[in-house]
Amino acid sequence: MPLLEYSDSESEAEVQIPPPSKKRRLSSEPFKELPPLPSSFRDQYSSTVRSSTRDDPSLHGGRKRATPHVDGNWPAHVYLEWIPKPAETALLSELIAEERSVDCAKQKLKSLLHNELDVCLPLHVSLSRPLVLQKTAYKEPLVQQLGQAIARCNVRAFQTVPTSLRWHPNELRTCWFLVLQLPESRELAQLLSSCNDVAALFDQPLLYTEAMDSSQAKHDEKKADRGFHISIAWSLNEPESTGDDPPGKPWAEQPRTSHADSDRRLARLSIAFSEIKVRIGQDVSSIPLPAAQVKKVNSG
């Protein structure tokens, strides 16, 4: 439809002006919080742009890679992702601030809850060591094998509650992480076993197998404490042990935090997992877990 309409006289052009539009009335209803972004959207923007093709600790606050980068290889990682709610982020920030206040060495404790732009970041539970695929052709088969193995273990979506706040070093003991220790559970044990089986198929290192001796691995796997955890901050300074760790536990060599009531406050957290994430290079794939079964309540 033309925007201008002319009369029969070519010398007089009459422009039809549309009536003024009605102003939109502001709603008196309270503002409704937008639903969270789907994890698939976050996966597309989860990686930062590489600033160097060489390992440069200065780009990562002084941290060194436990597995050096090699051009042509594909770094990979299997994990469970957790996106804390605002109230949960506030609690974790409070715990980090308390650790910073203990002594001067911990004042350089760096939070993993936000990036440089103060945007909240997802946290994770590792289900594999850092893996290195030496061929591009291995990328798709790795994801397929993981999907099949996780389906066979029949783990459904589940929840867990942290048991304590601890310090945990990397393999080189050049960096220490403030972590939420998670209890051993059937779901975590089965997912770990499935992921380790697939890692072995690709000649990759296994996770947490050093926490069990061979006899315990065969006869008492469910009770093995393999140190599942969620890192919330990190430091280049080794923390001092508080000396209250129970003997005979794999985590006993790691110092606890200095605030005794932190464990009580962690009981407020209920961490839900509904999918497995597989990162290969900068690509992230998601393997959903079946929905949790609803428990029937007896009416009589």
Image (spheres, helix red, strand yellow):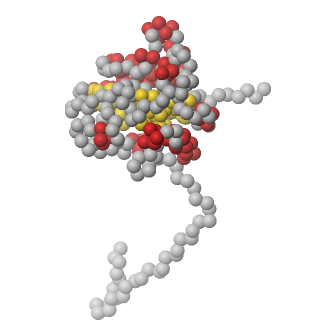
| Location of residue 281 (image quadrant) | top left
Residue 22 in view here: yes
Q: Is residue 190 above or below residue 56?
A: above
Percent of width and height locating residue 138: 27, 26
- Residue under the image location 65 percent in, 28 percent down: 295
Quadrant of the rendering where the N terminus is positioned:
bottom left
Q: How many marks?
A: 0
Camera-side residue of 138 and 100: 100
In this picture, residue 109 sits left or right of residue 172: right
Camera-side residue of 279 and 224: 224
In this picture, residue 61 sits left or right of residue 213: left
Q: In this view, which residue lies farthest toward the front?
A: 104
Q: Is residue 273 above or below residue 184?
A: below
Percent of width and height locating residue 11: 29, 93
- Residue under the image location 59 percent in, 66 percent down: 27
In this picture, residue 142 sits left or right of residue 20: left
Residue 287 in view here: no
| Location of residue 95 (image quadrant) | top right
- Residue under the image location 37 percent in, 85 percent down: 15
Quadrant of the rendering where the C terminus is positioned:
top right
- Residue under the image location 57 percent in, 68 percent down: 26
Percent of width and height locating residue 83: 49, 40
